[in-house]
Amino acid sequence: MLQDNQKAKRYCAIKYTFAIIDTVYILGLLFLFLRLGLSGILAYNISKVFSSSFLLIPGYLLAISLLYYLLDFPLTLYRSFILEHKFCLSKQKFRDWLFDQFKAGILTYIISLILLGAFYYILKHNPVLWWLIVSLFWIFFSVILAKLTPVIIIPLFFKYKKLSDEILRQRILILGQKLKVKILDVFEIDFSKKTLKGNAGFVGIGNTKRVILADTLKDKYSHDEIEVILAHEFAHYKLKHLLKIILLNSSATILAFYLIFKTSGYFLGGFGLSALSDIAALPLIAIYLVACGITLQPLENYFSRRWERDADKLALKVTGLKEAFISMMEKLSLQNLADRNPHPLIKIFFFDHPPVDERIEMAKRF
């Protein structure tokens, strides 16, 4: 057990380090891109290539996305492929991983194009209240995306089918009825093709809500353990945590765009930019969004950990499966190489769930 904990500590330490490096790296690249005038040069050349201004945003976004991906590729390769294989958490072939990267890149580009297209259109036509209207559009779009995730996005990367274990399926459906959660059905997802980590979730909104169980979890956990996992997920809906998360994220989005509206004028001239509506100012907007994300992360994590504790307590209350909860947490932490007892600063900045040891202690006292 001690050896496993040490292995998990090493794995997590590397993950934390790379998360910090990635953040500093992207902020540094964005700053240099603006400071050296490269953003303006790129925007000028894109405008010369495309005679129509309608193609300026797609062209600029494509160019800067490809450039960033190439510069970030070594870090991405190590963090999401080499490291996972080094710690025996993945058996995915490099070709398949690269194809996933390609699909994720296209998907990210399409979503970014929609959001940025709306941003610049609204900025142009409503220069006073654009920050509020853009925020509301981005919030609305995120809700639509959450609804479409199980029917469009997940199938791009995984195959899933209706759960074949009828006894387990009925237990989960009955559990949903007990917590008054409407479920389309229970599905099994082929997680093992990409990772050996265990996972389960309750995804979708409205008529797309469904339970998905990773095959890496379904085949290694008892029915009691799986039931208490799903009871936790259902508890989030019962306690209206999804609505609270949307409100919290919405507040953060509105705050970020309001700060851009009020303060970006002080920085535009320093980077040789004429206005926020200039496509060359996009890296400045990205710096704002990344910086706001870092600043607000501890607060968002704090509320998330509180809601996770509440979901754990309700799951235990509804199922009464105290021992199954504890054994499930022990197994899951070992399977996923979780940091069971992180340093307080690590917990503040990186943990949106209570650490495993805290969750187990809570269950023992329940």
Image (cartoon, rainbow, N blue to C red):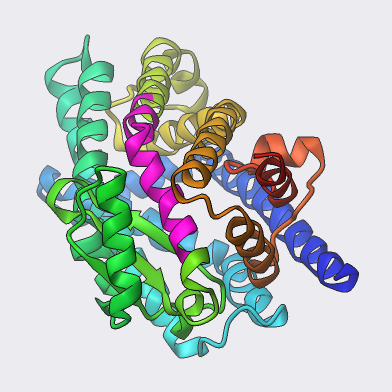
As drawn, 267 above or below 62 = above
- Image quadrant in which you'd find residue 352: top right
Q: Nearer the viewer, residue 70 or 35?
A: 70
**Left or right: 229 in relation to 328:** left
- Measured from the top left, where is residue 291 in percent x and y? 55, 31
As drawn, 92 above or below 130 = below
**Left or right: 323 in relation to 98:** right
- Please name the predominant secondary structure of the magenta segment in the image: helix
- Measured from the top left, where is residue 240 in percent x and y? 34, 31
Residue at (58%, 25%) from the top-left corner? 299
Residue 46 in view here: no
- Measured from the top left, where is residue 120 in percent x and y? 21, 32
Residue at (32%, 81%) from the top-left corner? 165
- Measured from the top left, where is residue 87 in percent x and y? 72, 78
| Marker count (numbered) | 0
Quadrant showing the N terminus: bottom right
Q: Nearer the viewer, residue 17 or 36?
A: 17
Taking the magenta stretch, the answer to whether it contains residue 108 is no
Quadrant showing the C terminus: top right
Q: Give the range drawn in magenta.
A: 226-247
Residue at (58%, 81%) from the top-left corner? 90
Q: Nearer the viewer, residue 284 or 141?
A: 141
Residue 193 in view here: yes
As drawn, 309 above or below 199 = above
Residue at (46%, 71%) from the top-left corner? 223
Q: Nearer the viewer, residue 345 or 262?
A: 345
